[in-house]
Amino acid sequence: MNESAQARTVVPLGLAQTLAWASSYYLPAMLAAPMARDLGVATPTVFAAFSAALVVSAIVGPWSGRLIDHHGGRPVLMGTSVLFAAALVALGMADSAPALFAAWALMGIAMGSGLYEAAFASLVRLYGHDSRNAITGITLMAGFASTVGWPLTAWLEARFGWREACFAWAGLHLLVGLPLNAWLPSARAMPHGEGSQLPMPPPSAAASPDAPSARLTSILLAFVFAATWFISTAMAAHLPRLMQAAGASLAVAVAVGALVGPAQVAGRLLEFGLLRRVHPLLSARLAALAHPIGAAALLLAGPAVAPLFAVLHGAGNGILTIAKGTLPLVLFGPTGYGARQGWLMLPARVAQAMAPFLFGLVLDRLHAGALWLTAALGLTALAALLWLRSPAAATAGSHAMAPERSRP
């Protein structure tokens, strides 16, 4: 596969993903409070609407993936640029709690068909087993979504107001995101029935022909994705408060939180460099172990090792984001990838929606001890990954991804 040809796809798609994440997933952190004040609702109500959007995105994911399987990512992602713009306009025009929930529900449709899973499926539809580096490149670029999105959203809100900030993001989707997604190469349309089958597509030739084994692999992967996304979202929502519960000052807690983003990018660079030569299962296992090690160190040694916890958690989370795209590919092959990815990520999206509330309850009760919960989840995810075996590696088939032909 010509790497320069992939780069011509990865760069515009990565920029479009950065825009999509910055204007959806990272929007409530900056706008929830002014939205709540203006609409006369409590701030948790805005986050409840956002959680509802995540549930909607989980439901939409498999159907969006199936469309990408059949028609390629270009028309789907172009459509989601319009959906994101419409949702942001609806959000900016909301004048009541029901209108707020309706706008976020529309945003959920856009998120379910326009974020990482859709981008990964689009790349697999174009490049098949050669997609690993392209997937890593997308996550490297979009890893800066909060770095770009939070300051820009905060500036727009302070300068013009939260409604105008939503309208500005909508305009960026139409003026920037839509042309970027239109840059994607077209993929040959597949006849109906040639792509994925619902509710769970059959494994490709690269996977084991044993259907019960394929179902077990799907269940284990879905659990790994749900557990790791629960951890990631819980930390994103509560990390400063968690650090203070562990004994850190507010200033230290904020500084520690600032380390997570760069650590995620560093983890993805590690995956793109050293770990690209090993099987994705091995890199995923190492990444799943990072959070439990960091959590145990923090709980046993106290806030002095809080920076180590942030670096380990961030790096592991960065690599696991890539694994969510590469593991289904290497374990099942490219056939039906989009729909399968949607189904595998459905429990993860639900876990993501529940994580801030549920972990907040545990944090209220156990304080820093709440980390034992996420550490245990990380270890169970590691156990599930250790159970998995790559059919491509076991058979040394020609469909195995080139850098990953040896069994981990």
Image: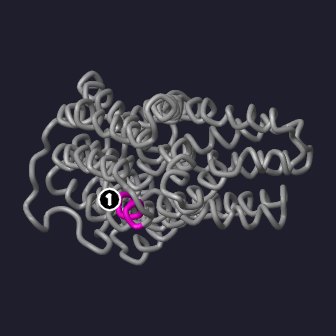
Q: Nearer the viewer, residue 287 or 403?
A: 287
Q: Is residue 331 visible?
A: yes
Q: Is residue 377 left or right of residue 264?
A: right
Using the image, determine if residue 176 lies above or below residue 281. above
Q: Quadrant of residue 208?
A: bottom left
Residue 199's place in the image compared with 29, above or below, is: below
* 135 vs 346, nearest the viewer: 346
Q: In the image, is residue 289 part of the stretch drawn in magenta?
A: no
Query: Percent x, y for residue 82?
Result: 22, 46
Residue located 58% across and 34% down the image: 267
Residue 261 at x, y percent in the picture: 60, 34
Q: Main secondary structure of the magenta part?
A: helix
* Label 1 residue SS: helix
Residue ID at (74%, 57%): 375
Q: Residue at x 64, y 46 (%)?
A: 286
Q: Quadrant of the N terminus?
A: top left
Whether residue 207 is visible here, answered yes or no, is no
Mark 1 is on which residue type? Leu
Residue range of the region highlighted in magenta in the rendering: 98-104
The residue wearing badge 1 is 106
Badge 1, how many Cα within 10 Å: few under 14, some, many 20+?
many
Residue 100 lies in the magenta stretch:
yes
Image quadrant where residue 243 sits: top right
Residue 60 relative to residue 141: left or right: left
In front of the other: 227 or 52: 52
Q: Residue furthest top?
A: 4
Residue 265 lies, in percent from the top left, at 55, 31
Q: Quadrant of residue 65?
A: bottom left
Residue 383 is situated, as x and y percent measured from the top left of the image, at 64, 62
- Vertically, is 242 above or below 172? below
